[in-house]
Amino acid sequence: MNVDRVRTTQLTGTVSPIYDHDGIVLYNADAFAFLPAIADDYQAVVTDPPYGTGWTSGGVDARGSGTRSKDHTASSIATYEKPEWDVWNTSWIHIVDAYKPVAIFCPDRVLHTLAAIRPTYRLRYYVKTMARPAWRGLDSVTVEPIFISPGPRYSKEACHLIADNGSRGAGKSKLHPCQKPVNVLSWILRGCCHPDHTVLDPFAGSGTTLLAARDMGRRAIGIERDEKYCKIIVQRLSQRPLFV
Ligand SMILES: C[S@@+](CC[C@H](N)C(=O)[O-])C[C@H]1O[C@@H](n2cnc3c(N)ncnc32)[C@H](O)[C@@H]1O
């Protein structure tokens, strides 16, 4: 089993939420430092951790999880050591109690690591159509696994998820480069989290998980370390949906 090095950061002082309304709470903090402080406040995790950032190493990584290479220069290998990249060492999962359900967007190369940590799981797939509109007019599809443990329990929906990433060029209007459609997150929340549970997204991005939870009348906690995205989340949450 490939148990990753656990990155711990000391949390100094108290962190107050920057948004706390309608059962949705947002913290501008580093998830690694902050997760232990809120261990009792959530019952499930739905998240889309940053990955791909700085993925430039040409060698076998310390986690044995893939060797795809874009660039083999010394500086690129140094990039690999960046904290952003470190996030996908899965160490944050060890901070989450093993009995709490998790749904995690992830690259295929870490599936075996996740399965070693959480042996009872199901996979669902987020299918992005036209994910690369710049490719000379060719339609394209990319598939992103969603690792769900212990597996969807609250919904009878058995099909793999298929969702359109939007029309060609939709990426330009995204608030975050990795923004997910709200309906994809609603699907996950419906299928994987008990309606009475508070769901945590430790890598909130533009806040799609929080938005989906809010629109479904669920409770959620988000953590996002980038102040710029925190502002975007607050802005999104401040806009009420037309139809619920
Ligand atoms: C893949 S994005 C999430 C996108 C989100 N699903 C959405 O729909 O907008 C991951 C986010 O995690 C944030 N992040 C990275 N490391 C973090 C950390 N240690 N603590 C909290 N947030 C972090 C990044 O700033 C980024 O916005």
Image: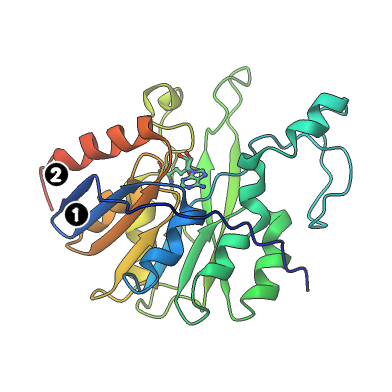
Classify residue 62 as left or right of residue 233.
Answer: right
Residue in the image at 31% along x and 70% along y: 41
Classify residue 167 as left or right of residue 3.
Answer: left
* Residue density around tag 2, few if under 14, some if 14–19, many if 20 or more, within 10 Å: few
Name the N-terminal-most of marks 1 and 2: 1
Secondary structure under tag 2 reads: loop
Q: Which mark identifies residue 89?
A: none
Secondary structure under tag 1 reads: helix
Vertical comparison of 192 with 73: above or below = below
Residue 195 placed where, x, y %?
Answer: 25, 73
Q: Are marks 1 and 2 in contact (CB under 8 Å)?
A: yes
* Residue density around tag 1, few if under 14, some if 14–19, many if 20 or more, within 10 Å: some
What amino acid is at disc 2?
Pro
Residue in the image at 42% along x and 52% along y: 12
Vertical comparison of 181 with 185: above or below = above
Residue denoted by label 1:
215
Q: Which mark identifies residue 241?
A: 2
**Measured Cα–Cα span from mark 1 to mark 2:** 7 Å
Report the front residue among 84 and 182: 84
Residue 56 placed where, x, y %?
Answer: 77, 34
